[in-house]
Amino acid sequence: MLGIHEKFLVCDEKFAFVGSHNFLASGEESWEREVGICSSDREIIQGLINSFDNAEVLEEEEINRRFAASVIL
């Protein structure tokens, strides 16, 4: 999609938000700048729904491996 660690939120097929913001984990104290866009375009919303519905299902072991590989020490 964006080539970043994107997240997306779809609300009742009325609007969608795509961005880098961690919806549940970010606080106001964060110094990092986040980017995002909100759209009510039905094609964009349906594309995001399709991305979610067709997402790869990973076993816990693979999730842990990918997470460990993404952490910079």
Image (tube, rainbow, N blue to C red):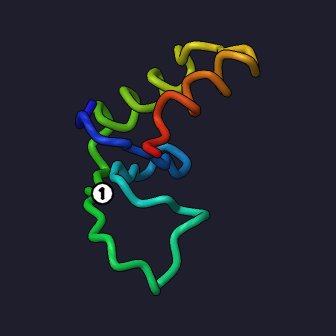
Q: Nearer the viewer, residue 5 or 9?
A: 5
Q: Secondary structure at mark 1?
A: strand
Q: In the shown orientation, is residue 55 left or right of residue 15?
A: right
Looking at the image, which residue sits at the far bottom? 29
Q: In the shown orientation, is residue 45 left or right of residue 68?
A: left
Looking at the image, which residue sits at the far front? 73
The image shows residue 23, relative to residue 7, as above or below, that is below
Density class for disc 1 (Cα within 10 Å; few <14, some 14-19, many ≥20) is few
Residue drawn at x 58%, y 32% as measured from the top left: 68
Residue drawn at x 38%, y 53% as measured from the top left: 17
Residue drawn at x 24%, y 34% as measured from the top left: 3
Residue that numbered label 1 is attached to: 38
Question: What is the x, y in percent for residue 69?
Answer: 50, 28
Q: In the shown orientation, is residue 20 left or right of residue 27?
A: left
The image shows residue 27, relative to residue 70, as above or below, that is below
Residue drawn at x 59%, y 65% as measured from the top left: 25
Question: What is the x, y in percent for residue 49?
Answer: 48, 29
Question: What is the x, y in percent for residue 40?
Answer: 31, 50
Q: Nearer the viewer, residue 34 or 55?
A: 34
Q: Quadrant of the N terminus?
A: top left
Check disc 1 and give the amino acid type: Cys
Number of numbered discs overlaid on the protein picture: 1
Q: Nearer the viewer, residue 23 or 30?
A: 30
The image shows residue 42, relative to residue 31, as above or below, that is above
Question: What is the x, y in percent for residue 5?
Answer: 37, 42
| Residue 63 figure quarter | top right
The image shows residue 61, relative to residue 16, as above or below, that is above
Q: Nearer the viewer, residue 6 or 10?
A: 6
